[in-house]
Amino acid sequence: MTSFAPPPADPRALLRAMFDAAVAAADPMAMLARHLPAPPKGRTVVVGAGKASARMAEALEAAWDGPLSGVVITRYGHACPTRQIEIVESSHPVPDEAGRRGAERVLAAVQGLTEDDLVIALISGGGSALMTLPAGDITLAEKQAVNRALLACGAAIGEMNVLRKHLSAIKGGRLAAAAWPARVVGLLISDVPGDDPAVIASGPTVGERSTPEDARAIVRRFGLELPESVTRHLAATDGCPAPDDPRLSRTENHVIAAPQLSLEAAAEVARTAGVTPLILGDSLEGEAREMGKVMAGIAAQVLSHGQPLPRPCVLLSGGETTVTLRGRGRGGRNVEFLLGLAVALDGRPVWALAGDTDGVDGAEEVAGAIATPDTLTRARAAGLDARAELANNNAHAFFEALGDQVITGPTLTNVNDFRAILIP
């Protein structure tokens, strides 16, 4: 376990120290080297996509003894200095043309390889949108429309990725299949509940168990209105390569960083400060504002009855909530959770931080925010109605007005959401 200096007693500082420790525990530069395979007889080609992929490429170059080539795709502003591996930047969460062109280059990089060659795939959260290559005659604009509909409907990340895979020419194991007969080693940083490699970035190196009918069922469940080309493709496609596809027989995938490890690092910071941590789970899902209410109820039980543990304590959790858009505000799942929590706590002596470990909550260049016992009081003094802002999905603007945003810039990693509820 990494050691950290004792953080200050100030609740805000302690919350931020825990968040920073969670992010640091997932830094590719600190742990990627020990997961690298031995160099092959032939070429080593590096491909990948995700918010952490550029940092992973930088870490790989620092540790690798021998020549490399390849290309990885990351989010705009998340590039890192590399010498042999090219970094392409594209858009997230809605795909763009740069991501489509980058995906074509990634796929081209693994063509024509032999059994003596090695492909190292650097995959992390965000890769599904960043590396977009529509299947069939689906256009990029049509794929963008599907992505926007998925983001707005409240679908869980696993459901989103099932549909994305069946509309893609590179995801759902297709990247690994294209590299056959080369050996493929996927190094994955998990940002998904359960750390399932097939879900991380829509599993470009993992065989897919879902079927086209599963994808069509998701469309029906959420009442998605899709372009005709998308509906036509879903009706005709044979699906993705299955886990037992012979082209995937030389592929292996390893999750090298995950939410649980980051929560454990944050818990160690709490212990050092004399605060008892309780990790509630690393894969919690659900509507963000509703989870805020649930967590407020647990905090209230601690305050009233000293259960499930006495004060001082901190309740830690990870995973990925969802937001169903009802208003027109500047939202994000972490700040919406936090505003729901603050409203439900209604001034109780509880501090909390919620943030995305990649430094970007939703589409905002803001990791998250901090809520304090006087959040609602300060909001009223500023002329803000917390409940109205929550109804309008306007939590980013709410916490910005209070000066309580957590802004880190790109962290160059991504192990999903981090939530800490501190009860001193």
Image: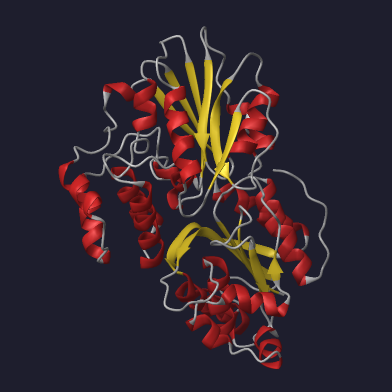
Tell me where residue 398 appears, x and y as whole percent: 62, 79
| Residue at 66%, 51% in the rendered image | 410
Q: Residue furthest left?
A: 236
* Number of numbered tags placed on the structure image: 0
Tell me where residue 54 appears, x and y as whole percent: 61, 37
- Which image quadrant for residue 35? top right
| Residue at 51%, 29% in the rendered image | 47
Task: Evaluate whether residue 322 shows in this view.
Answer: yes
Task: Point out the image quarter for the N terminus.
Answer: top right
Viewer-side residue, 159 vs 76? 76
- Which image quadrant for residue 201? top left
**Vertical side of 156 occupied by 352: above or below:** below
Give the colour scheme of this rendering: secondary structure
**Vertical side of 103 occupied by 381: above or below:** below
Tell me where residue 342 appears, x and y as whole percent: 59, 81
- Which image quadrant for residue 247? top left
Task: Point out the image quarter for the C terminus.
Answer: bottom right
Asked whether, in this view, residue 290 is left or right of residue 16, the answer is left
Viewer-side residue, 172 vs 271? 172
| Residue at 44%, 22% in the rendered image | 110
**Vertical side of 153 occupied by 393: above or below:** below
**Vertical side of 327 occupied by 233: above or below:** above
Task: Evaluate whether residue 308 shows in this view.
Answer: no
Q: Residue furthest top?
A: 41
Asked whether, in this view, residue 30 is left or right of residue 177, the answer is right
| Residue at 83%, 64% in the rendered image | 8
Tell me where residue 191 appears, x and y as whole percent: 51, 49
